[in-house]
Amino acid sequence: MSKLHNLSSTELADEFGAIDLQIKALTERKDALKDEIKARGLERVEGPTFTVTVSTSARTTYDDKAIRAALGDEICKQYERTSETVTIRVKPTAIFAGIAAE
């Protein structure tokens, strides 16, 4: 049995939404801190509680449209994989929308 089994569906929705707002705010703050660390050119910063290190790596991506244009859809379809994903979206209800936008 899950730890949240005692929550009603509406309580699940409201807690999910509230946490989503907190995560978005924290992510914005984290991104701003990351940008500042990069802007200062820091490679390693040691604070009393945490040490932050910066590393650079290369990543290769493929241009799907260009590959399909060059090889054609039939060849590309031979190498495609499809997997099922579940997406959960959250938005404020009409009553709460004004508060959430602040």
Image: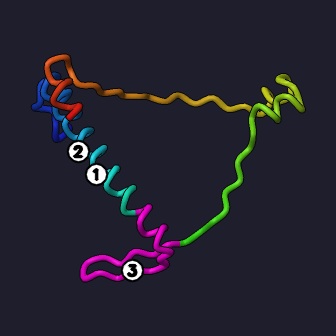
Q: Which residues are magenta?
A: 34-54
Frontmost residue, 12 versus 29: 29
To which residue does mark 2 refer? 22
Percent x, y of residue 91: 28, 25
Label 2 close to label 1 by CB (< 8 Å): yes
How many other residues sit within 10 Å of disc 3, few (<14), some (14-19) or many (≥20)? few
Label 2 close to label 3 by CB (< 8 Å): no
Query: On the image, which quarter does residue 87 sit in?
Result: top left
34 left or right of 67 in image: left
Residue type indicated by callout 3: Val
Label 3's element?
strand
- Mark nearer the N terminus (2 vs 3): 2
**Which residue does the image show at 13% across and 28% down from the upper left?**
11
Query: On the image, which quarter does residue 82 sit in?
Result: top right
Percent x, y of residue 44: 44, 80
In the image, is residue 67 above or below residue 22?
Answer: above
**Which residue does the image show at 48% across and 68% down from the upper left?**
39
To which residue does mark 3 refer? 45
How many other residues sit within 10 Å of disc 2, few (<14), some (14-19) or many (≥20)? few
